[in-house]
Amino acid sequence: MTSPTLSDVARAAGVSYATADRVINNRGNVAEKSIAKVREAVAALGYVRNVAAANLSRGRVYRLAFLIPRGSNAFFNRIRQHIDHTAAHQATERVTAEVIEVAAFAVEGLQDSISDLLARDFDGVAIVGLQSAALEAPLAALRDKGVAVVGLVSDLPQAARAAYIGIDNIAAGRTAGRMVGLAHGGQGGRVQTFAGSLDARDHAERLTGFREVLQADFPQVELLDPIMTKDDAQVLNAQTRQALGQMELTALYNVGAGNSGLIAALQEGQGTRPFCVVHELVAHSRQALLDRHIDLVIDQRPDVEINRAFTVLRALIDQKELPPMPDLVPTIYVRDNLPADTLTDKMKAKIDD
């Protein structure tokens, strides 16, 4: 048996093909009585809307935007490259993607950028978010306009977006805490943490998870207050030098970016260096693992995140159920399990993170 067609639905509902099409594709201007008849026919026949055919007939173009922090952050350069590659791959499916850069850790700047989107013709937007009530109104206005909104890497206020695409950052922080605690071998110590900003939910959650594990399972290890760096490599370099010069540290953990500055400070240090955990496998963190300047990298696989962002946004735009997707689990890299010849290796080491 062949699958029921829209003509079959129209015939069973006793309405015109045009009316059935308007109901199926949510185009409005149809009487409630006719809508009910079409929906009953859909249920009775088991009709499944052919999204691809509908989009082709309407000349549908998926216009996507990605709001990404500007700057020379190597991780977000990876994100930009994956967006470009994925958009090029999906161009034959009438998908376009524009990267819009916003100031890092600036709530007001992100608020203005989201508001600016209201004047643009986008169907879906993925945003590297911050946690602030100031973002709720412009995000609500964007969704009221019919734009699909998802949080990417760092989440938005939950009520203001349709989905979050990223790792469980509390779990990532707990993983770092477990590794740092075990590295102390039951002995006491002193740990210094660094973060870009606690307005970034991913940074705040990683610190929370890290703190939970050390306090619960390694109480003999002293955890110092985090130092804020705005993910600036020069700031992180100066702060690391100062921290190492002022006290004896047994471990360092940076929840954000700026790691080239951290690595440079450790390279120039004298004596035994602290155990060191950072996030994101990029060119310089990979090389630092190989050179034994750091011990562990926790990576969130941005290639998977970007592929998922495109998939989720298209499903939301088409008003389809989201496909089943497993949780994104952070990957732990040490010098012994580094992937060979990845996009990471091809990035230029001169990019500051």
Image: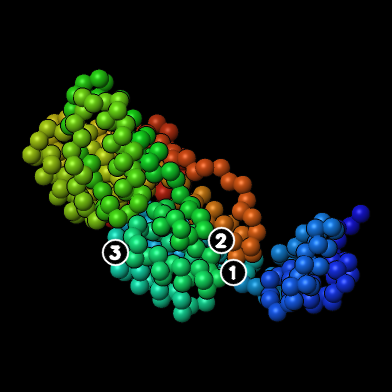
Residue at the (35%, 72%) spot, across then down: 112
Residue 233: image location, x then y, percent = 23, 53
Which residue is tagged 1?
A: 62
- Mark 1 or 3: in front is 3
In the depicted structure, whether residue 198 falls above or below residue 38: above
Q: Secondary structure at mark 2?
A: helix
Asked whether residue 103 is in view, the answer is no
Position of residue 313 in the picture relative to residue 275 (left or right): right
Within the image, what quadrant is residue 62 found in? bottom right
Residue at the (74%, 68%) spot, across then down: 24
Scheme of image coloration = rainbow
* 3 or 2: tag closer to the N-terminus: 3
**Distance between the Cα atoms at labels 1 and 2?**
9 Å
Between 206 and 297, the one nearer to me in the picture: 206
Q: Secondary structure at mark 3?
A: loop
**Distance between the Cα atoms at labels 3 and 2?**
25 Å
* Residue type of the residue flagged with mark 3: Ala
* 1 or 2: tag closer to the N-terminus: 1
* 1 or 3: tag closer to the N-terminus: 1
Q: Quadrant of the N terminus?
A: bottom right
Position of residue 203 in the picture relative to residue 328 (left or right): left
Which residue is tagged 2?
A: 313
Numbered tag placed on residue 106 in the rendering: 3
* Residue type of the residue flagged with mark 1: Tyr
In the depicted structure, whether residue 144 falls above or below residue 186: below
Q: Are marks 1 and 2 in contact (CB under 8 Å)?
A: yes
* Furthest residue toward left: 246
